[in-house]
Image: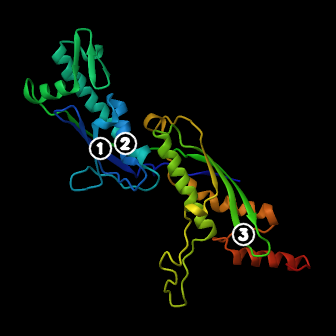
Amino acid sequence: MVILMQGSSIPEVDMGSAYMKMNDDGSFNLHIGATDLGTGSDTVLAQIAAETIGISVDKIIVYSSDTDFTPFDVGAYASSTTYLSGMAVLKVAEKVREQILMVAGEMLGESKENLKIEEGIVYGSKGKVTFEEIALYSLYQKNQFQIQATSSSISHKSPPPFSAHFAEVEVDTYTGKVKVLKYVSATDCGTAINPKLAEGQIEGAVINGIGYALCEEYIFDDKGRMLNPTLAFYKIYGTRDLPEIKTILVPTYEETGPYGAKSVSEICINGPAPAISNAIYNACGIRLRKTPFTSERVYKALKEKNEKMGGKI
């Protein structure tokens, strides 16, 4: 097993921004500089915006990454997108929500403090108005203005996610081949905004980490030329290679993150190498510190161990 901690963004350095406007059909454009690398961040940030305003997520139209018309973001690195850019989205959505309540209060003749939003409808003691009606009123009827806002967020802390990984391996002492039979990861990433996406992040990171631990390596000749520059020779794990994987989310609440969230991206890629190294040591008494743990390296270590003990492998 191995226990891990990582971090969420770089304090006093990382910054993310978001812009949002309301359309005349009651939908919203959300412009974010954070890039979705396949992690699902567009979905997660849309969920944060929808939850804050009080609408379904399908009403949020996300535009990300294009620096020509999205606000600044430091980038998809340092496990910062949900924690940092998510807080910028939460702040901008709060501003937009306040403008919606202000216009609705004007339409209903009530104080915005007496209003509530449920599923894209503003309810008051004197009646109700839909988001579409609010948008049309703000754009065309009285005191016209565009409901819109922008906001930025900077990280003052870097709350660490925590994780514990467990690996069960099988070592063939005649060939040195290592096979991972079962892998379990338990991860505290705060409140998971989208649990399925969080589980996918963890499992993808674990698979990457197992590949790094067992087979992925750049090989160069004496002139610095790479000898395995294609996937025919640079081996990565595929679906058929995977062990049984179990993923556990341990819920906590991070006060400085959006809706209690911390990061969940990088931490789990760091687990397989030390966990598998520990498992190999537990299985046959050799301590490997250089990855990948190829059959050749395992066999060599076993041979050296047996020679020191006066035996033969």
Left or right? Give the position of 119 relative to 246.
left
| Residue 78 x/y as whole percent | 46, 55
Secondary structure under tag 2 reads helix
Residue flagged by tag 2: what amino acid is it? Answer: Leu
Residue flagged by tag 1: what amino acid is it? Answer: Ala
Residue that mark 1 sits on: 18
Observer-side mark, 3 or 1, equals: 3
| Residue 158 x/y as whole percent | 50, 46
Residue found 24% across the figure and 14% down from its top: 111
Please say whether residue 92 is visible from this viewpoint.
Answer: no
Report the Cα–Cα distance between label 2 and label 1: 10 Å
Nearest to N terminus: mark 3 or mark 1? 1
Residue found 83% across the figure and 75% down from its top: 305
Residue 45 marker: 2
- Neighbour class for label 3 at 10 Å: few (<14), some, many (≥20)? some
Do residues under tags 2 and 3 come within 8 Å of each other at their CB atoms?
Answer: no
Residue found 58% across the figure and 66% down from its top: 212
Residue that mark 3 sits on: 288
Do residues under tags 2 and 1 come within 8 Å of each other at their CB atoms?
Answer: yes
Residue found 21% across the figure and 17% down from its top: 105
Left or right? Give the position of 151 relative to 165.
left
